[in-house]
Image (cartoon, rainbow, N blue to C red):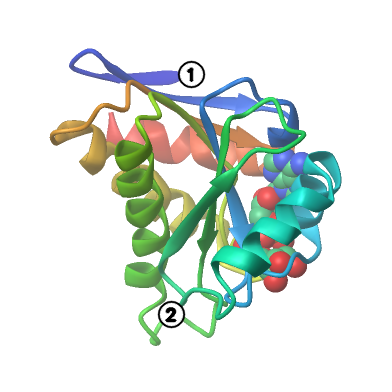
Amino acid sequence: MHLLIGERRLELARGDITTERVDAIGNAANAALRGGGGVDGAIHRAAGPGLLDELRRRYPDGTPTGTAVATEGHGLPARWVLHAVGPVWRGGGHGEAELLAGAYRSSLALADELGARTVAFPAISMGIYGYPPDEGARVALRSVADHLRGSTGVELVRFTLFSDDTFQVFEEALAELA
Ligand code: AR6
């Protein structure tokens, strides 16, 4: 399933983001940027120890929630990793939507700085951080669609979704957006 925005494409896929052959993959990181569970753990395992070394060296203080930093892809097929920090869901009244949108926006701003044309994202905050799936998918898709409507070198954004349930929720949200 996909949405065309001019010449640019926003698409949904099921799969494991660590195998994506795109210029940059997003990571659902934490503010300390020291690895963790979920997709973050999978990305660190697939990239190898050089990823953590680079994060420690370049970002010793981590990065705030709602922002992102970039590293090389190390052992991954992707050239870069955009480490985005989404919010922990605390009921919705703590700026969660704006922080989640910020995680995607910052990642795509970095993609533009790096010259990445193809980007794949996981469903940031929608695992361990507990963001409700339908609201999370809507925020994610809207943030990316807004970026693709603006002035950007990014030509393709793919949401690479690990579970059937998450994929279905994104499908419904994309149908609403289209
Ligand atoms: N490829 C694509 N998506 C995946 C993969 C994968 N290989 N593995 C899991 N997912 P989560 P969060 C999905 O928990 O909620 C870490 O400890 C997963 O099914 O990885 O932002 C960090 O260090 C879910 O839909 O990220 C932070 O401390 C989505 O990725 C914290 O977890 C996000 O789930 C971040 O929590």
Q: Residues within 10 Å of mark 2 (few under 14, many from 20)?
A: few
Q: Is residue 156 above or below residue 147?
A: above
User: Which quadrant of the view contains residue 144?
Assistant: top left
Viewer-closest of 148 and 177: 148
Mark 2 within 8 Å of ligand 1, using the beta carbon: no
Q: Residue furthest front?
A: 57
For ligand 1, give the image quadrant.
bottom right
Residue 163 falls left or right of residue 151: right
Element marked by disc 2: loop
Give coordinates of residue 53: x percent, y percent.
Answer: 73, 60
Up-down: is 17 above or below 36?
above
Name, please, the residue furthest toward the top.
7
- Residue 127 visible? The answer is no
Quadrant in which the C terminus appears: top left
Q: Nearer the viewer, residue 95 or 7?
A: 7
Determine whether, in the image, residue 75 is placed left or right of residue 126: right
Residue 1 badge: 1
Residue 83 location, quadrant? bottom right
> Where on the picture, by quarter, is residue 169?
top right
Residue at position x 28%, y 37% in the image: 145
Q: Which mark is residue 92?
A: 2
